[in-house]
Amino acid sequence: MDLEKLCLSVIDIAKDAGAFIAGERANFDPKLIEIKGKANFVSYVDKKAEELIVKRLRSLLPEAGFITEEGTAFDSGENFRWVIDPLDGTTNFIHGAPPYAVSIGLIENDEVILGVVYEISKNECFYAWKGSRAMLNGEEIRVSEASTTQEALIVTGFPFGEIKNSDAFIETIKYLMVNSHGIRRLGSAATDLSYVAAGRFEAFWETGLSPWDVAAGIIILKQAGGMVSDFNGGSNFLFGGEIVASNKNYFNEFQSVIEKNYRH
């Protein structure tokens, strides 16, 4: 399989979906929102974008299955599966607030081997495949060199709905607010991971995630020189609902902060 050629085709698909989303944002009617759960929304834009992406990917790699947020495809590939979030940051999109992104990852068995994140509002396309450099709009990106919390700007996602581990989250926030450059909350996990890959943030953690939130960003970050784990420092970060991500220099310290607060 020529992953480079495949990735370039996926970039075109992501950008086309992004153009559709941007066009719909101009005349978006909030009355068309569907509520999946507390602060968890979906619109016809998510669903239509996913249908467009699935149709193109199905012809690109017919043997691959799909894991999709909006459930427009149910194929189960034997070795390969596309993991798709057609609009990561739907709440941002609804309110007209960036960022929101198209996220497309390809996994072989349970390993992510290709990822594209197209952040629509800034027209930034992050991408990588197994063995490649991580790229942003054709230019190589790398994680930062920071090695301590005191040097770090950190990004996270706030829990919503039924909040679990709220005490651990608050303790982590308190520690990082006092000791780091600050904490940001963008509202798109795919963008968060891509920004860590580009060195804009030093680290990211979040719980309550789904595979489509993180699949593409995981390989972009890894190929940019970053590291990921679950909260225990293990490898259950794609399907386990939680992720710790950072550059290599800072990873051990940051992961230990998360593990200490969430596992005590």
Image: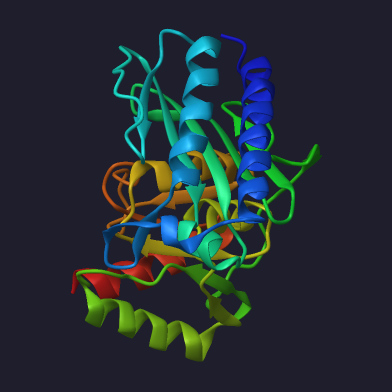
Q: Residue at x 38, y 63 (%)?
A: 206
Q: Quadrant of residue 138?
A: top right
Q: Is 262 left, or right, of 141 in this rendering?
A: left
Q: Is 105 left, or right, of 12 in this rendering?
A: left
Q: Where is residue 13 drawn, in percent x and y?
A: 63, 28
- Up the image or down, 254 lies above or below 36; here it is below
Q: Is residue 187 visible?
A: yes
Colour mode of the rendering = rainbow
Q: Residue at x 67, y 56 (%)?
A: 26
Q: Is 78 left, or right, of 145 in this rendering?
A: left
Q: Residue at x 57, y 82 (%)?
A: 182
Q: Find the residue positioned furthest to the right.
A: 139
Query: Which of these two is toward me, 10 or 120?
Result: 120
Q: Find the residue positioned furthest to the bottom.
A: 178
Q: Residue at x 62, y 64 (%)?
A: 98
Numbered label tally: 0
Query: For the C terminus, which image quadrant?
Result: bottom left
Q: Where is residue 111 drawn, in percent x and y?
A: 40, 29
Q: Where is residue 195 drawn, in percent x and y?
A: 63, 57
Query: For the N terminus, which image quadrant?
Result: top right
- Up the image or down, 228 lies above or below 19; here it is below
Q: Is residue 119 visible?
A: no
- Up the image or down, 92 lies above or below 111; here it is below
Q: Where is residue 230 drawn, in percent x and y?
A: 32, 53
Query: Which of these two is toward me, 122 or 234?
Result: 122
